[in-house]
Amino acid sequence: MIKTYHTPKGTIHGHKPQTKHMINLKRGLPLGIIGVGNEQGFHSHALVTKCGEEEAWCLKQQSIEVDPKEEHRYATAYLILMAETMAGYLRHGFGGTFIPTLYRRNKPNGLEIGIAYFGKPSPTGIEASEFEPQPVYDRQFGNGFFTMFHHYYEELKKTSTRTNIPLRPVIGLDTRKSSHLDGIQVQMIAQGRTLFVCNQNLTEESIILSILASCGLEDFVHLPCLHIEIDEKHRDAAMEVKTEEEIREENRKKLQALKQRAETLKQRIKNLPNTDEQQ
């Protein structure tokens, strides 16, 4: 299914996620992805940031605290920069999964707001095969993660210059567990050359789609996505990978079982005594 959006800045096509996309995400995300629903029956997906006692790691790009009253202004600026940057990042052709998220953290002197990067490099991607590993950062994420971050950050600086939206000075670049952050906003997931847009509701007036279209992107996969902590017992659901053939075979067996149950029920009904004749 394809939905075309004619934004003020150009046309862009949204695709429904396919089985192959979900398989790749379960393989490519540190702790997987899981389907979720709410009381209204709406179904979406959630990036797993904690499973049992295991937490996902992120690379936190920290800036000086701001006045909490200014949160909306700074958040909007960051989200515009992050969307503008993604097109340039995708052109590098890395194979891994890279997720720049907007994070917030309450502190005594104000609100810490910035970008926290989650993800996982591909062992066969150019980020791991053509660049030197950076052990200080890569040991928590896998060889090639810092390369993906570095190229994204270089594109981010170019975007800041091009849009005249200043980047706030970075005072730290640290690896942290997800629980270190008070909240994150998942806007986009880049995996290989596929871009997943994670906003819940998209329209032709959505700023993110206008920005992506203006940057020359023609296609994306619409994957409404939150973040979630799950119990250990749900790990298989988040990370279990089945091929399309396995799914078809599983569905075939379920259908066969239903047919057998229907046939058994049919025979039981047929063998019931005729109460009219007995009377």
Image (spheres, grey):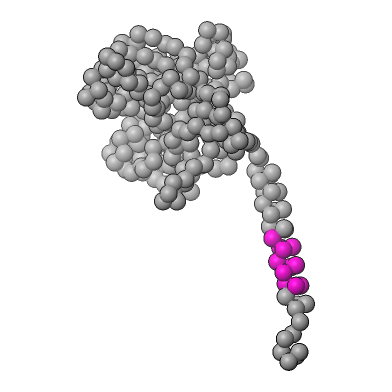
Query: Which x, y percent locates residue 229?
Result: 50, 32
* The image quarter in which residue 84 lies: top left
Most extreme residue toward the front, as rendered?
279
Quadrant in the rendering for residue 260: bottom right
Query: Who's the residue at 57% across and 12% down the image?
Result: 139
Residue at the spot x=52%, y=28% of the render?
A: 50
Q: Compare residues 15 and 110 and report the one nearer the observer.
A: 110
172 and 243: which one is in front? 172
- Please state the horizontal and vertical placement of residue 78, each as a whole percent of the image: 32, 23
Placement of 86 over or under 131, stated as above or below: below
Magenta-drawn segment = 258-268
Q: Name the quarter where the C terminus is drawn.
A: bottom right
Q: In the image, 70: left or right of 3?
A: left
Q: Nearest the camera: 30 or 144?
A: 30
**Residue 88, percent from left and from top:** 41, 23
**134 sits left or right of 68 in the view:** right
Left or right, 251 with reference to 159: right
Q: Position of residue 73 (x, y in %)?
A: 24, 25
> Is residue 154 at least partly visible in the picture?
yes
Is residue 3 found left or right of 235 in the rendered image?
Answer: left
Residue in view at x 39 percent, y 37 percent: 199
Please, what is the dominant secondary structure of the magenta stretch?
A: helix
Q: Work out whether 79 lies above or below 138.
A: below
Identify which residue is drawn at 78% across, 77% down. Answer: 271
Within the magenta stretch, is there residue 181? no
